Image (cartoon, grey):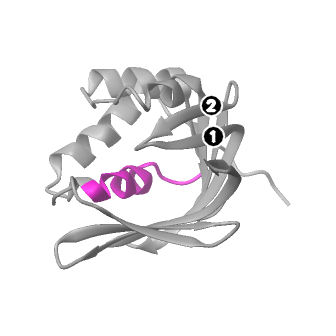
Amino acid sequence: MSDVAVTILTLEQVSEIIAKAQSSDANPMLMGMQLFNGLGNNVTVTGDTLRLAIEASAVPVTDALEPLVTAILSISKTGAHITTANHQKIEMTLNGNRIRFDEEVTCDVGGTPDAPALKNIAGVSAHKLAWIAIKGILLQQNDGRWKVQVTTSVGTVNFNIDSAKP
């Protein structure tokens, strides 16, 4: 069995992937899927390179997400599997919900081009009376409204994203 070579992406490569996703007429809700597909297989990007590419591409990072973006040491993609290494656990509040990201977060990307999904998530939890593991996220559009389905260790929650319009 041979090891598969891993490509470490450069600033120019990451900036180009972001620019391609920005220049397409894709729905902003699906841009993450375009970025994922643009990475190729067996790649790693360092946190420093990612942050420089985000800054150079003028991608806005909300104040709520800034600690998460700052904590990233690396993001690796092998096939449909993603691993994010963070320098520490990160806890933040998003839309009134406490969310925690461990030092290592993993998931498998799947779904369809119009309904992307993150499956087999490990290392992410939300706090509702206790910490609850987030296992999957599915993004869907129905009658012009976006819906997110979050699967947790205790059940599934669906909610609409009213402010995101295609």
Mark 1, secondary structure of its residue: strand
- Picture residue at 68% right of the left edge, 24% below the top: 87
Is 45 within the magenta?
no
Q: Which circle marks residue 100 in the picture? A: 1
- Picture residue at 48% right of the left edge, 52% below the top: 40
Image quadrant occupied by the C terminus: bottom left
Cα distance in 3D space between marks 1 and 2? 6 Å
Residue type at the position of mark 1: Arg
Residue 57 figure quarter: top left
Where is mark 2, residue-wise?
Answer: 90
User: Tag 2 or tag 1, which sits nearer the N-term?
Assistant: 2
Say above or below: 15 vs 134. Answer: above
Where does the magenta region start and end? Answer: 29-42
- Picture residue at 81% right of the left edge, 55% below the top: 2
Say above or below: 122 vs 97. Answer: below
Comparing 74 with 151, the one in front is 151
- In the image, residue 39 lies at what x, y percent? 45, 48
Q: Is residue 79 visible?
A: no
- In the image, residue 12 lies at what x, y percent? 36, 28
* CB atoms of marks 1 and 2 within 8 Å: yes
- In the image, residue 14 lies at what x, y percent? 40, 34
